[in-house]
Amino acid sequence: MKHKGAPSPHLGVQRALDEAKFGPERTLNLRESRPTVDAAVTRAEKWLRQRQVDRAGEVLIITGRGKGSEGGVPLIRQGVIRLLHQLRRQGVTAGFREHTSGSLVVEMAPVRTLFESPRRSGGRGPVTRPMEPGLLNGLDLETETLLRQLAQQSLEDLGVHDTEAFVRDEMLRQFSIIRRSMGRVADAERMRDLIRSALRD
């Protein structure tokens, strides 16, 4: 006889399957620490953006079912779902689906999607505003070199042969996209990781 409050065997099997499939690196458990909705969304955004750079494929976010919240409303789950819609528009995620009543499986978009989305949108999506040329002057040499490589590769993919004539403008465009895609978390090492992932893609 199963005791009241004991986890069901089904949940135990599901947890074991999830651990085998996703592992700790591709699982974000928001239920354990019981954060506020804002804290959970901020943590999820930072984590998902890094998983995209890491080319993680599918990842698991455990939101909980909201049983402990007022009225049993799954506020963290709702906040994370709103975030996932936003990140999909930004080219960070490719989609998501309900995994269980307390978890979601998220498919990460390739890093190149961040750089393609302004061109694909045909003017209907978010506009990348032009940036001041002087903004690139503050970059360290390694980041600027990587950004130049990315800009040249992007121009070559478009069929531009004389890349040097346009590379500075393309570097500014790519830098604008990178800054926007990094959200609230902006540091030089993470920027370089993002550029390297884009070059590999």
Image: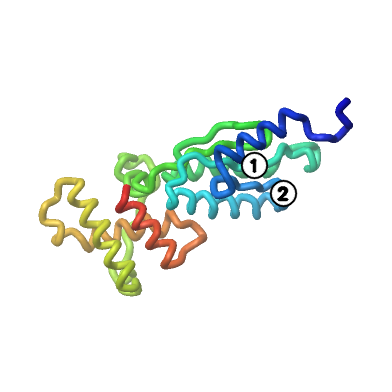
**Mark 2, residues whose alpha carbon is within 10 Å: few (<14), some, or many (≥20)?**
few
Residue located 40% across and 62% down the image: 191
Q: Is residue 152 left or right of residue 111?
A: left
Quadrant holding the N terminus: top right
Residue located 72% across and 49% down the image: 32
Q: Is residue 133 above or below residue 45?
A: below
Numbered-mark total: 2
Identify the disc placed on residue 13.
Answer: none
Question: For the view shown, which residue lies furthest in the top direction?
Answer: 1
Identify the disc placed on residue 32.
Answer: 2
Q: Position of residue 99 (x, y in %)?
A: 60, 32
Name the residue type under label 1. Ile
Secondary structure type for disc 1: strand
Residue located 70% across and 40% down the image: 64
- First in sequence, mark 2 or 1: give its number: 2
| Pointer 1 residue | 62
Q: Is residue 95 left or right of residue 151?
A: right
The residue closer to the viewer here, 109 or 86, is 109
Name the residue type under label 2. Glu
Q: Position of residue 155 (x, y in %)?
A: 20, 52
What is the spatial separation of the Cα atoms under label 2 and label 1, in whole angstroms? 9 Å
- Answer whether labels 2 and 1 touch (C-beta < 8 Å): yes
Residue 103 in which image quadrant? top right
Residue located 21% across and 56% down the image: 152
